[in-house]
Image (spheres, rainbow, N blue to C red):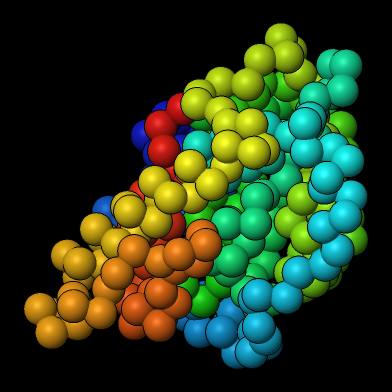
């Protein structure tokens, strides 16, 4: 397959939701009937459940000094040549139990800055970029079979992928576990700025900076799929 054809991959093909589909609409997903059909099919299967119920965090205190948080809200723990990777609690709160999580293949190569994990739902698909290079040695089959389980426990107790690293280096800006509130504060500012540009002047008076790492979900729900994906990319696809 030529480089040109690879670049034309439909986003649903790229994340593995469909086996083969090239984009013939210049990635205008908002007006694509195929994209709308996929999102409708996903929406029918979604469950309307709360996304704010988390499990016991007691184990986090024991390992918090080992946890590193990337600017794109992945958490990592390094043990020897291996990294364990998950999504932090801020990322977890953007999605709900109706989402599907698409994992890399065991034995596949991860490259820094390349997408290795996808979350898809009726809004579309968002990919998370790898901050390390290496080989995938393990994925969480329980979460792969039942993505809902990811939303029923503490984000830091859910290991998603384990990677044997080539060089043991985490690329991009990283935070210690006890510094993560600084990252959340910065991203809440980005969210507020984004929402201020999208809503009417009368609504803007109610869009204030949230406290405690929470954001105004009622406004997020009013965003179009295209705007919501744009916001997700702003938060979770920062350049490594």
**Where is residue 149 shown, x and y percent of the image?**
82, 69
**Where is residue 25 shown, x and y percent of the image?**
29, 60
- Against 141, residue 96 (above or below) is below
- Residue at 83 percent across and 53 percent down: it is 157
Write down the quadrant of residue 30 in the picture: bottom left
- Against 43, residue 138 (above or below) is above
- Residue at 24 percent across and 58 percent down: it is 193
**Where is residue 104 shown, x and y percent of the image?**
72, 43
Q: Is residue 94 left or right of residue 223?
A: right
Q: Residue furthest left?
A: 201
Write down the quadrant of residue 28 in the picture: bottom left
- Residue at 49 percent across and 50 percent down: it is 184
Question: Nearest the camera: 198 or 57?
Answer: 57
Write down the quadrant of residue 205 in the picture: bottom left
Question: Nearest the camera: 6 or 230?
Answer: 230
Q: How many marks?
A: 0
**Where is residue 228 shown, x and y percent of the image?**
37, 67
- Against 189, residue 32 (above or below) is below
- Against 88, residue 82 (above or below) is above
Q: Is residue 16 visible?
A: no
């Amino acid at each position: 397959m030529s480089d040109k054809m690879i670049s034309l991959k439909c986003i649903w093909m790229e994340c593995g939701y469909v086996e083969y589909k090239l984009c013939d609409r210049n990635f205008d997903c908002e007006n694509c009937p195929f994209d709308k059909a996929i999102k409708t099919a996903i929406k029918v299967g979604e469950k309307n459940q709360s996304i704010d119920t988390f499990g016991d965090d007691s184990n986090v205190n024991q390992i918090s000094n080992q946890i590193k948080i990337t600017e794109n809200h992945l958490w990592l723990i390094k043990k020897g040549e291996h990294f364990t990777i998950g999504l932090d609690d801020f990322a977890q709160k953007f999605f709900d139990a109706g989402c599907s999580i698409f994992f890399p293949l065991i034995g596949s190569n991860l490259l820094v800055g390349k997408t290795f994990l996808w979350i898809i739902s009726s809004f579309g698909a968002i990919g998370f970029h790898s901050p390390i290079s290496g080989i995938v040695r393990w994925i969480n089959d329980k979460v792969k079979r039942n993505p809902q389980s990811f939303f029923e426990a503490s984000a830091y107790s859910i290991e998603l992928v384990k990677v044997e690293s080539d060089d043991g280096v985490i690329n991009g800006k990283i935070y210690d576990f006890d510094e993560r509130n600084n990252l959340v504060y910065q991203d809440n500012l980005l969210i507020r700025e984004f929402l201020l540009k999208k809503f009417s002047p009368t609504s803007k008076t109610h869009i204030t900076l949230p406290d405690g790492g929470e954001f105004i979900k009622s406004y997020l729900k009013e965003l179009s799929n295209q705007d919501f994906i744009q916001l997700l990319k702003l938060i979770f696809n920062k350049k490594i």
